[in-house]
Amino acid sequence: MDILVQLLQQQPELRHLTGWTRLPTRYSASPKYTARDESGLSILHTAPLTSFRRKEREFEILRQLKQDGLPVPEPLDLNQLPEGSVCYSRYRFLTGSTIQDCVPLGRAGEYRLGQETGRLLNQIHRYEGPLATKWAVRCRAKHNRYVALYQQEALPLTGDQAILSFIEQNIGWIADRPNRLQHDDVHLANLITDGEHLVGIIDFSNHDSGDPWHDFVKMGLFQVENSIPFAVGQVNGYFEGDVPKQFWNVYSVYLAMACFSSIVWTSRHAPEEMEQMRGRLEHVLSDHQRFERVIPEWYETFSRP
């Protein structure tokens, strides 16, 4: 049996759990498990002991969101396991399937799920983030770090200087953006559905604070690739159909920045996926005509179902 499971099972609040199953994880070395009690299935996340304070913050965020009636996993337990050099958190398992596993669901169904996701994201973004260095300052510093690492890559993106110029010329668009709670990992594999409607959103492990519109970056990178109707619905649902031009200006700067961070992240964490990521970024650049346009073609040419 898994040694870590044996240690977890010795914890007083976990002794009643049965049917422990380790879940596959693609990009993390920290194990996740499901286990069951009389109330149903729960999921346990482990993390290095050094990240306990961050996991504590995540736990409190979810407790507040759940208390306010948002469809997120219910937090159950949080503790440290020094003998295993880990900490762990346990949440009630959201019943359903990921949207990633369910598509295609038809144009109208995917658009509806996108709308429901956008509305939920809007609710999440109403929560103030903790006081921190001004978002625009943090965002630029992070971008500069990624660009420096990107420049060490052997195969640059075609026309990368034009993308960098676009960012520098328009970075003022992200000034004075609000500091709100960010999920920071909004994609179809973190959205749960019953096949008709959105059940909830999971995995707040990357939570952050800053401009709420930054949470749309993965829409441009992943949702569009999987379902344009969902992506359009996500934007329209968030803004209840009245999308401001300012959103597309800000979004395009973040997406341009993501062209560089995505190359660096993939190179370091999933090099076997680099060809796929480069192809994805070429589609992004095509949709935005290499950022000569801020509103992507996929949005402007979509006809609502």
Image (cartoon, helix red, strand yellow):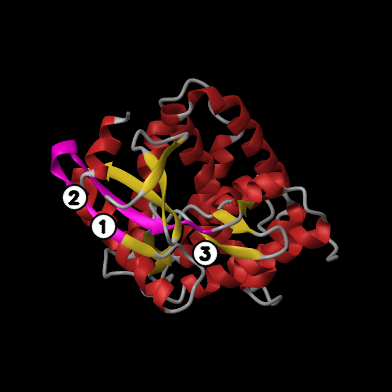
The circle on residue 78 is: 1
Residue 84, percent from left and from top: 19, 37
The residue under label 3 is 213
Amino acid carrying label 3: it is Trp
Quarter placement of the N terminus: top left
- Write the start and end of the magenta stretch as one range: 77-94
Above or below residue 103? Residue 234 is below
Residue 47 position, x and y percent, is 28, 43
Quadrant showing the C terminus: bottom right
Q: Is residue 3 left or right of residue 233?
A: left
Q: Residue at x 69, y 40 (%)?
A: 283
Task: Name the one closer to the observer, 75 or 276.
Answer: 75
Q: Which residue is mark 2?
A: 80
- Look at the picture and state if 186 lies above or below 85: below
Q: CA distance from mark 2 to mark 1?
A: 7 Å
Image mark for residue 266: none
| Amino acid of disc 1 | Leu
> Residue 143 placed where, x, y %?
40, 46
